[in-house]
Image (cartoon, rainbow, N blue to C red):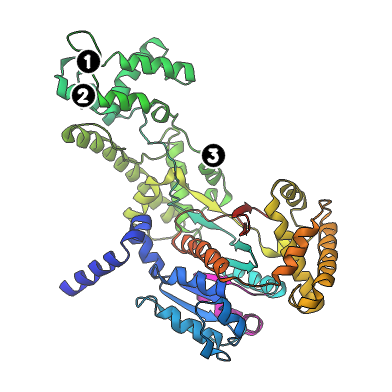
Amino acid sequence: MAGTSDAFSDKSKKYDRQLRLWGDHGQTTLEDARVCLLNATATGTETLKNVVLPGCGSFVVVDGEKVTEEDVGSNFFMQKDWIGKSRAECATALLLELNSDVTGNYLDETPHRILENRPEFFSSFSCVVATGLEEKTLLLLDKVLCDYGIPLIIVRVYGFIGYMRIVVSEHTVIESHPDNTHPDLRLDRPFDQLQKYTDSMDLSAMNKQDHGHTPFVVLLLKYLDKWRATHDGAVPKSYKEKKEFKQLVKTGILCNEDGVPEVEENFDEADKSVNSSLVPTKVPSEVQSIFCDDKCINITKESSLFWILARAVKDFVENEGEGALPLRGSLPDMTADSARYIKLLQAYQEKAKQDAEMVTRRVQQLLKEVGKAEYSISGDEIMMFCKNSRFLRVVRCRALSEEYNVSTAKREELGMHLEMADDLVYYVLLRAAERFRDEHQRLPGVIDDQLMSDVTALKSCTTAFLQELGITTAVSHDCIHEMCRFGGSELHTMAACLGGMAGQEVIKLVTHQFVPFNNTFIYNGMTCSSVSVEL
């Protein structure tokens, strides 16, 4: 037992910072993940590096190319004396040195050949990262992974332009970790435990010390009771009403012998938190759309844990919750003595536990109805879902085949975005560069003495592409010339930058924490600007 405890302690120290982001359960999910990298380009290896360092379970590098001088010049994971050797083998060797907890392997074979002959090879991966693939190979990969339900991240560096595309038919997120959230205090509809605890306190009978250490939640609820008594039971809603309510709260501040108000931090906190604490209790629109989803309404034996839990919470909201989601059961920090803060927190936790128990009964009933074991979803999983029910998200990215097909392409949206976002012009140029490669078997600008003729040819490809989409927006000559000057080069600084971004998206997808972008991301290294759009 001591050895196991020591190993756990060492791992906790090693991954301390990331454990604070996604917790032990997130780390466990990451350690169970199996990631596949297609082509060990500079961008590909930088992406995989940022998945290996946090401790992904295992990886496989698929690449049929040999190390070239160009690789050595742009790829940190390649060495000069490796020229002519398997690029997959060389990259794997150095990646494995980064983290002893991670296992890795390589396959010295082209991705396209595997897709044509052994597509089932991809069925066991948690996520696939693709770099340096032609459009025809990407479309084939897109179809194979869609059939297996495996997320795909395409990442590419083209000179000073970075491109990422996520393809996943459905990605559910329970722990979305929003940056800014209002505390779930339920002051507009106080539950029994909270109201009882608040009623047990008499502010007028308190000494100065206790008065100044009464939790601001209690203060707000007491003065809300007074407000409701004179406003037909309604809470302050408009800016004017909230301003009047703040003045009402301030009347409770103790005064000294000269009649001057004392400085009481808890009343200052109450004043500052009025706007955030009096947010109406309702189901957010994003969560309501999940409740209206067909997968939530029609639960079957094939339904995932997410959708079964979502349906149970939906039923709870419509019945026991009376229109409200399960209580989160947490409190923000506040000025209060420990005893009263703990009692207040216990009131919230007791209510959250009661809500979770009601949801649990509904989960067990749903599982029974569809022929699954009643306890196949653990209590911890249900509690986690209830706690985060306000922040549930479902991301559905369009398939590449839909994006590349002129009849299903979002032509109007793309045209509108081109007019509003300058950086999106490089999406068009990247697509046009692929057409150039189909026609000339090389990327534009790779041959110096043909630069100007390549500019003309790339302009023709760009114009034809836009005409097929029915878009009248023109691409400037300077941008086309710049794309040709890039020559399809992969700069290491750009590869490191995009690799860091793509690594984050891989972790989001395999841990189901945080929300990945949907679905196209363009980064302009010349202006350090970016744009994310759904195409």
Contact check, label 3 and label 1, Cβ < 8 Å: no
Q: Which of pointers 2 and 1 lies earlier in the amino acid sequence?
A: 2
- Residue 460's disc is none
Contact check, label 2 and label 1, Cβ < 8 Å: yes
Residue numbers of the magenta segment: 111-133
Q: Residue at x 36, y 48 (%)?
A: 360
Tell me where residue 426 appears, x and y as whole percent: 70, 59
Q: Residue at x 71, y 72 (%)?
A: 487
Tell me where residue 192 appears, x and y as whole percent: 29, 29
Tell me if I can see residue 150 in this picture.
no
Q: Residue at x 58, y 83 (%)?
A: 63
Indicate the quadrant where residue 154 lies: bottom right
Q: Secondary structure at mark 3?
A: helix
Tell me where residue 467 appears, x and y as whole percent: 85, 57
The amino acid type found where label 3 is placed reads: Ser
The answer to whether 108 is drawn above or below residue 505 in the figure is below
- Residue marked by disc 3: 285
Please state if 320 lies on the left or on the right of 491 as rendered.
left
- Residue marked by disc 1: 254
Dot 1: within a 10 Å radius of its alpha carbon, few (fewer than 14), some, or many (20 or more) residues? Answer: some
Which mark lies nearer to you, 3 or 1? 1
Q: Is residue 376 magenta?
A: no
Q: Secondary structure at mark 2?
A: helix
Q: Which of pointers 3 and 1 lies earlier in the amino acid sequence?
A: 1
**Towards the viewer: 79 or 440:** 79
Dot 2: within a 10 Å radius of its alpha carbon, few (fewer than 14), some, or many (20 or more) residues? Answer: many
- Residue marked by disc 2: 212
Q: Secondary structure at mark 1?
A: loop
Q: CA distance from mark 3 to mark 1?
A: 42 Å
Q: CA distance from mark 3 to mark 2?
A: 38 Å
